[in-house]
Structure formats: C-alpha cells, structure tokens
Image (spheres, rainbow, N blue to C red):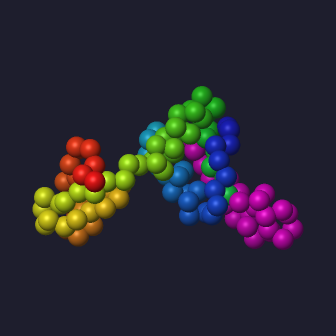
Amino acid sequence: MKRLLQAPNLALATLWCDQLMHAGIDSSVQRAYASGIAGEIPPDQALPEVWVHEDAEHERARALLHELSHRPHRHWLCHGCGESVDGPFEQCWNCGALCRPASPPDA
C-alpha cells in the first residue's frame, strides 16, 4: 500500500479515489475524518489522503489522475440543440447529448 497524494478536502479525495477504482486501480481514502483534530495535530497532517493498495499500480494511478485533471479545453457546438459548449466536457450541458466532435479545438 502506497500513498498517492494528499487532497485539500474529503470531497476531492473521494472523487479521485472513485475515479481510480473505476479504472480498476484498488485504492482508498485514509484520514478521511482527521480534520476534526486539526487543532491537536498540524493542519497539513489532518488532510485526507488517497492510497493505492498495490505498489505496482502507483505510477499508473498518478498518470491517470494527471490525465483526468488536465483535460483539453474545447469549444464546440452541440449537434442536438445547437448550444455552444465550452470546456473539457463530452456532453452538452443543455440537452445532455453525447455529441462532442473528435476534431481539434475550434478556437
């Protein structure tokens, strides 16, 4: 078992752990509720951490989280409703259609 990273809050730690688990990397959130004793221990030691259970998966997990947090910023028009969508999204925020084009960014 090896520590992957320290998260700024429990919500992000849980989200990152869920993304790893979805990719088949066995992981868990440690120190999930340590923020309650932040006055008794240094605050940076009370932050939640994401741990990978198999040491051999550590680099793959690090690369996956880096890829997920550095998605390309795109601007595209929805084929379903014509709405302008901006950001790393694959789905239209207006109608829910999965219609992001595979071509490079427009702008």
In this rendering, would 10 be left or right of 38? left
User: Percent x, y for residue 84?
Assistant: 22, 65
- Which quadrant of the view contains residue 7? bottom right
Residue 89 horizontal side relative to residue 69, left or right? left
Q: Position of residue 36 (x, y in %)?
A: 75, 70
Farthest residue to the right: give it: 40
Hey, which quadrant is residue 91 in on the image? bottom left
Q: Residue 19: x percent and y percent? A: 47, 49
Instruction: Look at the image and tell me whether residue 21 can be seen.
Output: no
Report x, y in % for residue 73: 37, 53
Assign the N terminus to one quadrant of the image.
top right
- Magenta stretch, residue numbers: 26-47
Residue toward you, 47 or 77: 77
Residue drawn 84% across the image and 62% down it: 42
**Quadrant (top left/top right/bottom left/bottom right) for the C terminus:** bottom left
Quarter residue 35 falls in: bottom right
Residue under the point 59% across and 56% down: 13
